[in-house]
Amino acid sequence: MKTMNCVLLGYGTVGQNVERLCRGIDGLEMKGVFVRPAKAREPYFSADGKALVSRQDVQIVFECLNGLEPANTLIRIALEHGKNVISSNKAVLSTYLPEYIKLADKYGGSIQIEASVAGGIPLIDGILKLSAAEELKGFEGILNGTCNYILSSMEENGTSFTDALRSAQELGFAEVDPTNDVEGRDVWYKTLLVSSLYTKSPVTTLPDPIGISSIGIDEIALAKKHHKKSAILQF
């Protein structure tokens, strides 16, 4: 069996689980992980992301960073070196995906995005197949597991927001910095990306998101009184 080499960008909750899964795949060898300088321990962990993504012996780049930079720069370098990039970063993909597709076509690599939005379902594959067959009018669903867990805990168990968030972090559902999740940015990025895919044109703006950090026991009780549920997104 021919061995394929890969590198990993980011070592948070998602990145660590990607590394774990890669170790269980025969014929796939992890060559290095890009982390912040304070956490870099050579040779496996490195703060030199540009060197990792441009290695001649690497075919696959798993990009599991947050935000636009350094993710955007490293994805571009990887694609310019003909790598196959698999990204879970909805923020950078929702902003630059058309440019990444052009780079992949030009240099012979690829950009894979299924992991960026509801990868466990999978949603993007379904959206692309359905939109090829008929015109879609919209979509709805729960697009953020962290918020879903927190709100479910508050609704079903009477847990406070703070305690529900702490539990989500302990279980690995929420990052150490949960801001993007609880303030709605995560779903905002995902909606931009999915909307662009099913309309087949870049969608670059939406109304500003409203997070769940201000929701307390009183709001949960009011929702229950009116037979309402939280954590539903509809466009």
Image (cartoon, rainbow, N blue to C red):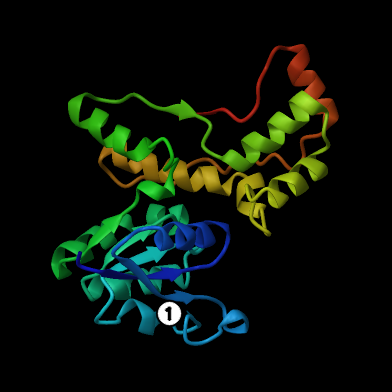
Q: Is residue 92 visible?
A: yes
In the image as oriented, which residue stretches furthest toward the bottom?
42
Residue at 85% x, 27% y: name it: 218
Could you say which quadrant of the image residue 100 lies in? Answer: bottom left
Q: As drawn, which residue projects farthest toward the top?
A: 226
Residue at 70% over, 45% down:
168
Look at the image and tell me whether residue 183 can be seen: no
Helix, strand or loop at disc 1?
A: helix
Give the quadrant of the N terminus.
Answer: bottom left
Residue in the image at 36% along x and 45% along y: 203
Expressed as whole percent of the image width and height from the top left, the position of residue 66 reads 52, 62
Determine whether, in the image, residue 154 is placed left or right of residue 75: right
Total numbered circles: 1
Picture quarter with the C terminus? top left
**Nearer the observer, 126 or 22:** 22
Give how far across and how far down residue 5 sits, in percent. Answer: 30, 71
Locate residue 19, reporting x and y percent.
46, 63
**In the picture, residue 51 is in which quadrant?**
bottom left
Q: Nearer the viewer, residue 216 or 27?
A: 27
Amino acid carrying label 1: it is: Gly
Q: Position of residue 153 (x, y in %)?
A: 74, 32
Give the residue pinned by disc 1: 49
Q: Residue at x 44, y 56 (%)?
A: 21
Q: Residues within 10 Å of mark 1 (few under 14, many from 20)?
A: many
Rendered view: 153 above or below 94 = above
The quadrant where residue 149 appears: top right
